[in-house]
Image: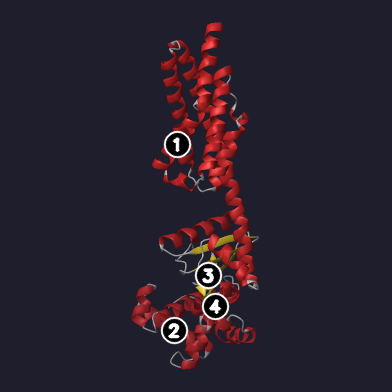
Amino acid sequence: MSGTTGSRDALLHAFNGRASTVTKTVIGRLYDNMPSYRVVPREQLAESIGQIIAIVAEVVRSGIVPAPDDIVQARTSAAARAQQDVPVQDIMRAFRFTIGGIHESLLQLVSDQEIPAAEMVLVTDTLWRFSDAYTTSQITAFQTAVIDRALHRARRTQQFLRDLADGVEDEAGMQRPARELGLRTDGTYAAVRARIDDGDEADRLRLELEQDAIRRGGSALYAVTGSELLGVTDTRPGIIGSAHLVGVGDYVGLLDAAASFRSAEVARNAAALIGMTGVVSAVDLGWKMAAAHAGDANAILAERYLEPLRRYGTFGRMIEDTLRAYLAADRSIPKAARSMPVHVNTLRYRLRRFEELTGRPLDATATIVELSWALEITARMETRWSDVTVAVHDR
C-alpha cells in the first residue's frame, strides 16, 4: 500500500509541475478546433483549466469523486461560457479536450516513471468517473443559465416594447437595447397588438408570429405583457389562426413606434367590434373603421335593413346570406348562386323578397352602400337573432 501511495504521490508531484504546459496545450487545441471559444479570453480559459487540473489532482490523490452538485467550478465555468454565447455542445467538447490533455499528461508520466500499470488503471477509472460527474454538473448549470438568460431577455423585451408604445423620450438611451434585441434603429417597423387573456395561448401566438417573421426573412420582436401581446415587425405577419385578432399599425421609424401602436390598437378595436379575426390594419378596414364606431348610423341601418328580415327567422337569415354572397360576387347573380350554391332562380327570388320586405331597391346606389354597411358592420356588431317559430319557406 505504501508503495502505491508513494508512486501516486510522485505521479501527482510531477503532474503538478506540468500544469502550465497542459493548460497551454489545451488552450491551443480549443482555439484551433472550436471557433466559439475564440471569444473567450485566454486568461479566463487558463484560470478555468487550472482549476480543473487542481480538482483532478485532489480526486486522483484521494480516490474520491465529488457529487455533481459539489463541483462548483463546473457550474461557474459553464454559466460564464453560456453568457459568452458558447453552445452547450461546445462547452461539453471543451471539457473533453481538457480532460483528454490531462489524461495524456498522466499517461506520459506513468511511462516516464515506470509506475505500475495497475496504478494507472485506478487513476484512469477515477478520472473518468470524475469526468461523468463534472459533465452532469455542467449540463445542469448550462440549463439554469439558459433559463436565466431567457427570462432576462423576456423582461428586457417587455420593458423595451412598453417604452416604445408609451413614446420614446430618450432616443439615445434606446439605441443600445434596440441593437441588443436585434432591431435596426434606422429601419421602419409596424407595431403589433393582440389581446389574449390566456397566458399559454398568448405565448403560442408569440411563437407563431416569431416563426412567421423568420420564414419571411424579416426582423421582429414580440413579448407578452399582462393580457396583451406587443410587437414590432418589418414584415407584415402572414395569415394566422382564425381564433385570434391581431392589429397591425402603420410603418414608421422604430423610435417613432408609439404612433404605430396607437393605430394598431384602433384597428384591433374596430375589427373586434364587428367580429373579425386574423391580421388586420386600418388600411384593411378602410371605411369599416368609421362605420364600426358610428352608433347612430348603425341603429338607423339596423332598423332599415335588418329588422325586416329578423321577423322572418330562418328565412330572414337565408336572405341575409344571399345578400352577402350577392355583394361579394360584385352583384353577379350567376356567380353568387354558384358560391352558395343555389339555383339562380332561388337567388333571384330571395333578392326580390328583400326588396319587398325592406322597400329598398337593389339597383339604387344608396341601397348598395347602406346594405354593405349594415351587413359588414351593423349585423356583425349585434347578436344574431334566435330562430323564431314563423315557418316561412322558399316557394
Location of mark 4 (residue): 312
Please identify, in this view, whether the residue under mark 4 or under mark 1 is nearer the observer. 1
Q: Are marks 4 and 1 in contact (CB under 8 Å)?
A: no
Three-letter amino acid code of the residue under disc 2: Leu
The Cα–Cα distance between marks 1 and 3, rounded to whole angstroms, is 38 Å
The Cα–Cα distance between marks 1 and 2, rounded to whole angstroms, is 75 Å
Label 4, secondary structure: give it.
loop
Image quarter in which the N terminus is found: top right
Location of mark 3 (residue): 185
Q: Of label 2 and label 3, which has the lower sequence position?
A: 3
Q: Of label 4 and label 1, which has the lower sequence position?
A: 1
Q: Is residue 306 above or below residue 17?
A: below
Q: Of label 1 and label 2, which has the lower sequence position?
A: 1
Residue at 44% from the left image edge and 29% from the top image edge: 101
Image quarter in which the C terminus is found: bottom left
Q: Residue 253: x percent and y percent?
A: 53, 75
The Cα–Cα distance between marks 4 and 3, rounded to whole angstroms, is 58 Å
Q: Which mark is residue 93?
A: 1
Depth check, front residue: 126 or 163? 126
Q: Of label 2 and label 4, which has the lower sequence position?
A: 4
Q: Residue 380: x percent and y percent?
A: 56, 75
Judged left or right of residue 112, residue 170 is right
